[in-house]
């Protein structure tokens, strides 16, 4: 009886934590207004003219759900003037987000241009796909906004399981990439951090750089044909971090005021017990864009380096 009660309390605590995360991402606002929708042709509604090129791409899906999805691809300045091939960073949104979130809320274009212009980061292609779960074309409805708990509680592993084949495959076949593990990175915020954690674990030969920004480290699975994607993490990561196969960089970032901070602490203790190499950065701030933009700035400066770089402490600007 006591064990059952404890289990129920743990599950309740996790649900409440998820609710807090969603509220921090702004999801609770869905109760107060009609859900905004995303429409094609407004990939960059910010008014900022990037030094590089932002392209809106539609790719075919290999799993059940919508026949195709949309992603944004940022090409660095000079891409169209040379035959140079570039490494690629796949950057995932969080709950209540879609492919435009990093451009609209994360000022991705401004931050990336600045770091490239000042020589603080190696030029690369940055890809922001739509990582929400959708049932079919009607449910997808032109990359529709996901209400309230949909972003988390409908996770079924489908879009994640096809990520390398569909997203990476499309990018490698349509752009001049360095199509190899040591030239690929994946990072994401909140549930996008969780997706990055598992996509890299399920595909140990695909990504040499992993960034987890305020990651949710537990998941409420939705049963389905792809639910095994989120199982057996220890076994999958044992392969991912095996000798000669371990990522060149595995960075975890979280604010000490973040609702997922306790989850991240538990995850780092697990990583320590397993002997998996990683770096963790604890900062000020909470589960919000000022932190995630600062984490992106820090991560981008560390990618594609032959040797680790020493950077100034991360500063959170509200």
Image: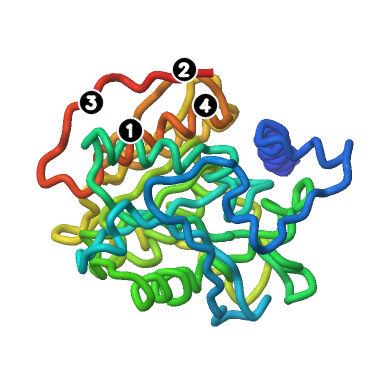
10 Å neighbourhood of mark 4: few (<14), some, or many (≥20)?
some
Residue, disc 4: 290
Q: Is mark 1 on a helix, strand or loop?
A: helix
Residue, disc 3: 311
Residue, disc 2: 284
Q: Comparing marks 2 and 4, which lies closer to the viewer?
A: 4
Residue, disc 1: 298
Q: Residue at x 34, y 73 (%)?
A: 172
Please say if the residues under marks 3 and 4 sit with CB atoms less than 8 Å apart.
no
Determine whether 238 is above or below 169 in the image.
Answer: above
Q: Which residue is drawn at 56% across and 72% down?
A: 58
Please say if the residues under marks 3 and 2 sit with CB atoms less than 8 Å apart.
no
Foreground residue among 193 and 42: 42
| Residue 26 seen in the figure | yes
Dot 1 or dot 2, earlier in sequence: 2
Q: Quadrant of residue 119?
A: top left
Dot 3 or dot 1, earlier in sequence: 1
């Amino acid at each position: 009886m006591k064990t059952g009660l404890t289990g129920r309390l743990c599950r309740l605590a996790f649900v409440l934590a998820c609710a807090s995360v969603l509220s921090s991402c702004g999801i609770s606002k869905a109760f107060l207004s009609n859900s905004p929708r995303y429409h094609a042709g407004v990939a960059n509604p910010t008014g900022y003219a990037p030094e590089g090129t932002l392209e809106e791409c539609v790719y075919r899906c290999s799993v059940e759900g919508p026949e195709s999805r949309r992603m944004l691809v940022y090409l660095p300045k000079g891409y169209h003037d040379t035959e140079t091939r570039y490494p690629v960073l796949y950057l995932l949104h969080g709950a209540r987000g879609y492919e435009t979130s990093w451009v609209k809320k994360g000022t991705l274009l401004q931050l990336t241009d600045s770091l490239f212009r000042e020589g603080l980061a190696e030029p690369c292609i940055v890809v922001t796909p739509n990582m929400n779960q959708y049932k079919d074309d009607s449910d997808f409805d032109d990359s529709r906004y996901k209400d309230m708990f949909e972003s988390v509680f409908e996770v079924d592993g489908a879009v994640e399981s096809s990520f390398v084949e569909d997203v990476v495959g499309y990018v490698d076949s349509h752009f001049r990439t360095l199509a190899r593990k040591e030239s690929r990175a994946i990072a994401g915020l909140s549930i996008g951090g969780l997706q990055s954690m598992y996509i890299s674990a399920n595909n140990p030969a695909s990504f040499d750089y992993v960034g987890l920004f305020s990651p949710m480290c537990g998941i409420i699975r939705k049963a389905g044909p792809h639910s095994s994607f989120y199982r057996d993490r220890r076994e999958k990561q044992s392969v991912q971090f095996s000798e000669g196969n371990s990522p060149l960089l595995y960075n975890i970032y979280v604010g000490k005021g973040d609702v997922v901070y306790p989850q991240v602490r538990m995850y780092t203790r697990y990583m320590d017990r397993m002997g998996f190499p990683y770096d963790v950065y604890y900062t000020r701030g909470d589960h919000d864009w000022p932190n995630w933009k600062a984490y992106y700035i820090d991560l981008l400066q560390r990618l594609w380096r032959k040797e680790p770089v020493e950077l100034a402490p991360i500063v959170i600007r509200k």
